[in-house]
Amino acid sequence: MTNPHLTLVAPTTVIGTVGDRRRPPHRKRNAEVRAREYLTDAEVNRLIVAAGKNRYGHRDATMVLVAYRHGLRAAELVTLRWDAIDFGHGRLHVNRAKNGSPSVHPLSGRELRALRRLKREQEPQSPFIFTSERGAPLTTAGFRKLIARLGLADRNIQHTVRYTELAPARFKNFWND
């Protein structure tokens, strides 16, 4: 027995083919967006300072320092283990991603001090150098998000600094025209 009050209606929307859909705009080339593909020492130092103000400031600042000094990809950084560091000779053994050749890098005194402190304070202990608060290794996505947040924080700091660096007498005779 059918209900006379219910009738089925065919959908009126038509789903188009793949060729009918609009494609998203192409990504601009890096050269069109920015003049250079690297950060200067001063810019990296500003990122390190900004990282030091986070909840896990020392860990984050050390991550930025080590990644910059050794040219590490995010995947190479987050997979670093304590057994890759030779504290006695100040060396870091790096296993490169993307079929790169493994290499040994010298560690500066600043890096050694930062890594020793990180190892002392790491809780819970882990074979990985850079871990989350739960002891799991940080992810590449987590590191990328950290860098994005630091870049925004640094940019906001720079706008504030530029504003406060205006000459104090710049508007001295503004109302006396």
Image (spheres, rainbow, N blue to C red):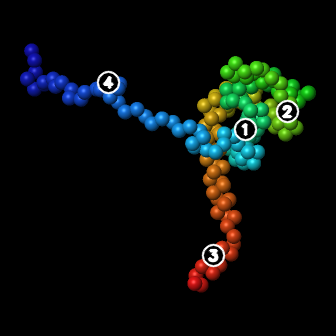
Q: Nearer the viewer, residue 93 or 177?
A: 177
Q: Looking at the image, is mark 1 or mark 3 earlier in the sequence? A: 1
Residue 170 visible in the picture = yes
In which image quadrant can residue 6 be found?
Answer: top left
In which image quadrant can residue 62 be found?
Answer: top right
- Say what amino acid the circle numbered 1 marks: Val
Q: Are marks 1 and 4 in contact (CB under 8 Å)?
A: no
Who's the residue at 76% across and 20% down the image? 101
Q: Position of residue 38 (x, y in %)?
A: 69, 40
How crowded is the residue under tag 4: few (<14 C-alpha within 10 Å), some, or many (20+)? few
Q: Looking at the image, is mark 4 or mark 3 earlier in the sequence? A: 4
- Say what amino acid the circle numbered 2 marks: Leu
Q: Looking at the image, is mark 2 or mark 1 earlier in the sequence? A: 1
Mark 2 vs mark 3: give the one in front: 3
In which image quadrant can residue 111 be found?
Answer: top right
Mark pair 4, 2: CA separation? 57 Å
Q: Residue furthest top?
A: 1
Q: Quadrant of the C terminus?
A: bottom right
Mark pair 4, 3: CA separation? 62 Å
Residue tagged 4: 17
- Say what amino acid the circle numbered 4 marks: Thr
Instruction: Give the number of the disc on residue 64.
Output: 1
Q: Residue furthest bottom?
A: 176
